[in-house]
């Protein structure tokens, strides 16, 4: 395999990994502070994508700039979800949280189907025809922008969590809720904020997904969400560095493994395409990890 | 005095059950051979079986979000077996159920050490894996296009829909009774103990692994049967049977009716099916789904014990 193809696959993998990382960090944030796994996270991604799509279709503004707006919109939606749905059932058991999320999934998916029909949508980024040459390979500019955006974001996020008061308040709440409350932190507000931030991140992931040319329909959220769960679990619930490592690994593995399998099968004289299995790689890795270590690789104890 | 009250309560519930059963048997005679009505009722009965089976697994604390996998596997295996071995659907359906039970045990094994969220995610993933495997094995399963399945009662027989209805009604009653007996038995108690606190259950000497797997096997078996019944009713099966919404229906039905109870899934299925069909009459397509989602959210927040808890709530309100 020529190095050019390898670089291409690597960049593909990095780009996908970045989207998963953004989703996974949101999930980790929500779980860390609220101790709740938001199953409807994929739908937040979907809504974020639709928000960007809609605003772009109406205004024609550079979609990259719309992302900020989409993030704010979803952040507000996130606040509503937290206050109206998750807060009332706090403490009633994990099964209830799962079922509530299911209801939300139904709601959002069909709301989107109602508003925008089930037809697939996509937009063209203004840079969709631009590619950057690295050696012998041409890489789409969009992918590079997304990777850079994610790097910038991760740095900003780290600074936020470590240096700002709010960031540290959130970390305190996730480490020990009671102690944080005793120190005067408004833990309910932290809940709200974490959900809002998590939703905003999902919106960013969804918007980037859309801008990079992927197809968007009301049901697109579940597969990226499951992969984000896989990333979170493999990296360890609540661990940001774990999410980053796992996200990149998954993104790259997804693109590399089917090719390996194909070459392997080719060696055996079998001509098969394994691309259909791309989405299931995340599950297989997830299942293997969970069977070996039910709390994830970098996981904290007590899930 | 207290003993008498308890007996009266039990009679109330059993009487409701008996009366509704009699009504169910009389429906074709009352309403005539109404194709639409009987079809709706048949699907409802299939989902009563399906929801009750899911509920049984949830009883052990294992809330599966991918039960469509068993539903679809039961359907496909039954259809394939009936087609290739020339068996009548009645004989093929249990085979579908057994194969689904086998897969259920395998999935249960992988999930044995997992907590609720992880189990939910993994089972969700299994439904997708089942979907992918089915579409990839297109030489066997017809791939994306699916395969035809023999009808339960051949269409050529007059009033076939009525016979189908009665057969499925009988099967549904049998399944519900079996699940009732399991729930009320020591097995059922063990499952509930496991759900409430796995560690304590183990300390009490309950073989957690055995019971968890048993729950998976039984639940998958009946779900597979439900799936087989449904596709032999339709006459066709496609990979859509593994869809997320198929996984969600039993959860919705069980929660609205009353999670962990035996009558809950039945009541929930009936009520929601009724609402569903009424909404269809108004021509609302996506609004129905949105409403269902809202109902689910509202029930989880305000009525977590489901509709079956409403009579008790009214009673306690009245007594106060």
Image (cartoon, rainbow, N blue to C red):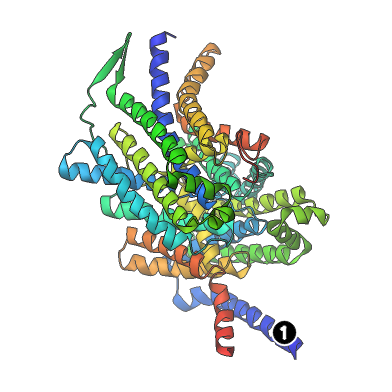
Task: State the residue at coordinates (33%, 48%).
Answer: A47
Q: Report the front residue among A139 and A158.
A: A158
Tell me where residue A206 appears, x and y as whole percent: 35, 40
Q: Residues within 10 Å of mark 1 (few under 14, many from 20)?
A: few
Q: Is residue A54 left or right of residue A293?
A: left
- Can residue B130 be seen in this snapshot? yes
Chain under callout 1: B
Which quarter of the rendering shows the C terminus of chain B? bottom right
Q: Report the front residue among A223 and B80.
A: A223
Q: In this view, which residue lies farthest toward the bottom?
A: B1
Snapshot quadrant of residue A67: top left
Local secondary structure at mark 1:
helix
Task: State the residue at coordinates (83%, 54%).
Answer: B205
Snapshot quadrant of residue A62: top left
Q: Which residue is mark 1?
A: B7
- Can residue B25 be seen in this snapshot? no
Q: How many marks?
A: 1
Q: Report the front residue among B194 and A142.
A: A142
Tell me where residue B129 appears, x and y as whole percent: 53, 38
Which quarter of the rendering shows the N terminus of chain B? bottom right
Q: Is residue B290 above or below residue A257?
A: below
């Amino acid at each position: 395999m020529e190095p050019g193809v390898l670089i291409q696959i690597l960049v593909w993998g990095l780009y996908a990994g970045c989207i998963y990382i953004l989703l996974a960090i949101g999930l980790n944030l929500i779980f860390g502070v609220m101790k709740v796994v938001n199953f409807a996270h994929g739908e937040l991604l979907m809504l974020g994508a639709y928000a960007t799509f809609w605003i772009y279709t109406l205004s024609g503004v550079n979609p990259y700039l719309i992302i900020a707006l989409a993030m704010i919109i979803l952040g507000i939606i996130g606040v509503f979800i937290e206050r109206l749905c998750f807060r009332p059932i706090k403490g009633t058991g994990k099964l209830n949280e799962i079922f509530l999320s299911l209801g939300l999934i139904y709601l959002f998916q069909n709301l989107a189907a109602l508003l925008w029909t089930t037809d697939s949508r996509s937009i063209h980024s203004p840079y969709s025809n631009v590619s950057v040459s690295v050696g012998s390979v041409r890489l789409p500019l969009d992918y590079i922008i997304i990777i850079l955006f994610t790097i910038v974001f991760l740095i900003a996020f780290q600074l936020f969590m470590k240096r700002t008061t709010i960031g540290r308040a959130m970390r305190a709440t996730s480490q020990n809720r009671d102690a944080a409350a005793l120190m005067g932190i408004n833990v309910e507000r932290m809940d709200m904020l974490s959900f809002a931030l998590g939703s905003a991140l999902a919106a960013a992931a969804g918007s980037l997904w859309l801008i990079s040319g992927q197809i968007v329909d009301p049901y697109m959220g579940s597969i990226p969400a499951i992969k984000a769960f896989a990333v979170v679990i493999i990296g360890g619930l609540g661990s940001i560095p774990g999410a980053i490592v796992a996200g990149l690994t998954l993104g790259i593995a997804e693109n590399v493994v089917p090719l390996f399998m194909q070459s392997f099968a080719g060696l055996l004289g079998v001509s098969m395409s394994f691309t259909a299995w791309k989405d299931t790689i995340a599950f297989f890795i997830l299942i293997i990890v969970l069977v070996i270590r039910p709390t994830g690789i970098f996981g904290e104890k007590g899930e | 005095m207290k003993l008498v009250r308890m007996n009266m309560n039990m009679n109330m519930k059993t009487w409701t059950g008996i009366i509704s059963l009699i009504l169910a048997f009389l429906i074709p005679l009352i309403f005539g051979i109404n194709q639409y009505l009987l079809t709706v009722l048949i699907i409802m009965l299939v989902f009563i079986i399906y929801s009750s089976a899911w509920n049984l697994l949830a009883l052990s604390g294992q809330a599966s979000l991918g039960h469509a996998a068993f539903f679809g596997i039961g359907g496909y295996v039954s259809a394939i077996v009936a087609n290739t071995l020339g068996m009548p659907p009645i004989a093929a359906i249990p085979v579908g159920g057994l194969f689904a039970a086998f897969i259920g045990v395998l999935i249960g094994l992988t999930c044995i050490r997992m907590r609720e969220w992880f189990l939910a995610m993994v089972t969700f993933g299994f439904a997708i894996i089942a979907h992918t495997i089915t579409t990839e094995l297109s030489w066997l399963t017809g791939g994306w296009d699916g395969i035809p399945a023999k009808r339960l009662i051949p269409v050529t027989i007059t009033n076939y829909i009525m016979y189908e209805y009665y057969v499925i009604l009988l099967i549904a009653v049998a399944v519900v009774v079996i699940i009732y007996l399991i729930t009320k038995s020591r097995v059922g108690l063990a499952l509930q103990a496991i759900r409430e606190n796995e560690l304590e259950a183990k300390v009490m000497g309950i073989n957690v692994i055995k019971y968890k797997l048993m729950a998976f096997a039984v639940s998958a078996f009946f779900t597979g049967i439900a799936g087989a019944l449904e596709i032999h009713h339709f006459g066709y099966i496609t990979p859509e049977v593994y869809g997320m919404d198929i996984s969600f229906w039993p959860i919705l039905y069980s929660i609205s009716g009353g999670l962990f109870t035996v009558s809950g899934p039945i009541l929930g299925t009936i009520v929601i099916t009724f609402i569903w069909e009424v909404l269809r009459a108004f021509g609302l397509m996506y609004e129905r789904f949105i409403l269902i989602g809202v109902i689910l959210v509202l029930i989880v927040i305000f009525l977590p014990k489901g509709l079956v808890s409403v009579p008790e709530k009214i009673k306690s309100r009245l007594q106060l």
